[in-house]
Amino acid sequence: MTPPASPLHVTFSESLMEENIESAEFTITKWDSLSDNNDTFCNTASLFSGNNREEAKHYLSSIRGLQKAMQYLVSHQASSEKLVRAQTLMQTAMKRLEKEFYRILKSNRFYIDPESFSTHSSSGLSAPRSSFSDFKEYETENESRDEIDSLPEAQRVPLAAMEVLSAISEVMIKAGYAKECIKVYKTIRKSFVHETLYSLGVDRTLNLQKIQKMDWEVLEIKIKNWLHAVKTAVKTLFPWERILCDQVFSIAPAMGDHCFTEISKEGALTLFEFPENVAKCKKTPEKMFRFLDLYEAVSNHWPEIESMFNSESTSTVRSNTINSLIKLGDAVRTMLTSFETAIQKDTSKTTVPGGGIHPLTRYVMNYLSFLADYSEVLSDIVADWPLTIPSPLPEPFFGSPDNEESISSPVSVRLAWLILLMLCKLDGKAAMYKDVSLSYLFLANNLQYVVGKIQQSNLKILLGDEWVTKHELKVKKYASNYVRMGWSKVIVSLPENPRGEIPVDQVKDHFRKFNSAFEEAYTKQTSWVVPDPGLREEIKISLARRIVPIYKELYETYGGMHLRREMWVESLVRYTPDDLGNYWSVLLNGSRSSSHGGRSR
């Protein structure tokens, strides 16, 4: 059996109890008289303003003393009128603190960069017990006050207000008024989260039906807005709400978790339902890159999302996010398949004038160049999606298995496969040209465009130097075939040994055939084009090397000035070696010229 308390202990406790009640009554009544009698929280005279700091500390201290007095009365004088009096005072004080709590929350946005906040954690700003202790009963000689005062104004104001909120919530929770405290907190902060998301362009009314009815141009703008919104929400808004909940309810972490869930869950669900709904829209290849943007954003932010919304009550936020990734990945695979099918089904029969770049080549290579910028995202999406092809891939195209640079990653193989499909289509389109030499020029032009696009983009990293080198050699081969086929009559019109003894009639015949073949080839090819300056110059150099030296020897031996006395020279020798260079200088530029001047005078 517990021995009864000594009379001295009882007398001392009663005296202290009465003193606490008297002190609390004076302080609470004083501030209650300064308040309006209506329920409008913001019309309350501020107890926690800068000038009333000491008064505020005393007010909270009085409530703590009143609480101790009530505990004593419950234990020793449960039916005492003093307990009723103390309870009435506590109710008045709690109503006052509830109004102050509301006013502080309403007048402070509490929206600073969490990273800035965390940089001061080493000094105690993130520690629950030592952070905001100036108003609490476990003061630490104003260490945290000095820390707060050292911060920039933009951070100091919300952190100081947070200190007050933490002290108020602690007193209210210990006094049994946690429900009232939490209700005010959730109402204000949830409204703030919704307002912030709305200002970022997150529309709670934008459901799947509305999204599916939107024109793509409008939806694309919504996607761009969402990409900015999710970054701000995940990097700043939600982390700061997490910090604020932890600090304000540091005395009761479970309450902080509950508040964060209630405040952030609805907004987070709205935010992360958007990409999932977009993924359910009609899928066409031109939408690919916005879908990849969405996937990349969600994937990049997943670690933070998983960390912030880690409780059972926020599991729907995590599951929504995962579903968004799954649906977006499915959509991207569908669009890749559609893109491949579009290449395979291309049936355009029109040839490109002059053997230039085919629209299919431009479209596919521009598309793949952009895709290559998303290689990391694509590697996640296609990792477990094997490429299905009708026959084994040609080794020359994909590289030797023994070569370290051979194409092996799922993304690289898939992109190489799409390029191969396109090149096969181009082979068919080349066959539509009636002139074989123009077919080769077409192939050279288009493959050069492919190689150029690869070298100028991340495709080079994915396909490797070996791929590029092999196809550069193919370009040279096509160009060589064009020279051989397009200028064969000119080449064969010249003698094998122009400095040897050649009968005059044969010399005449060589010049006559050369003139005819050269003019025919030149006239036909003036409208042909090689868009790439480097390739065009290589072709001209190749032409000059194969024709000019032989023609120059023939010209110098039989068509020079020392043979002017022969009448046939004037009529048959139409071109000097320099003339040929002048003609070739404008060849393959795509601009037709009808002038075929005679020999330079």
Image: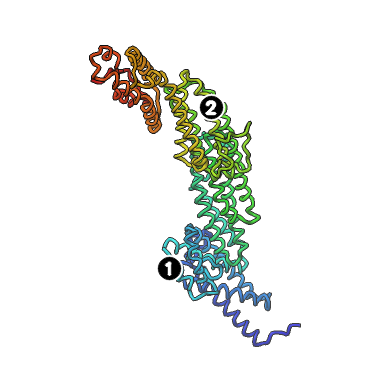
Q: Is residue 332 left or right of residue 123?
A: right
> Which quadrant of the view contains residue 328?
top right
- Rendered position, 449 above or below 314: above
Residue reaching furthest to the right: 1
- The image shows residue 108 at horizontal and vertical percentages of 47, 59
Task: State the residue lying farthest toward the front.
Answer: 501
Q: Which residue is mark 1?
A: 150
Would residue 409 be found to the left or right of residue 3 on screen? left
When the figure is inspected, residue 433 is found, relative to residue 54, above or below; the finding is above
Label 1 packing within 10 angstroms: few (<14), some (14-19), many (20+): few
Along the viewing direction, whichever of 33 and 384 lies nearer the viewer: 384
Give the x, y percent position of residue 535: 40, 31
Asked whether 83 or 316 is in front, the reply is 316
Query: To which quarter of the image does residue 277 belong?
Result: top right
Mark closer to the chain start, 1 or 2: 1
Q: Mark on residue 425?
A: 2
| Amino acid type, callout 2 | Lys
- Estimate the x, y position of residue 422 in percent, counting from the top left: 53, 30
Query: What secondary structure is marked by label 1?
Result: loop
Three-letter code for the amino acid on which mark 1 is drawn: Ser
Q: CA distance from mark 1 to mark 2?
A: 69 Å
Nearer to me, 462 or 32:
462
Above or below: residue 264 compared with residue 543? below
Quadrant in which the C terminus appears: top left
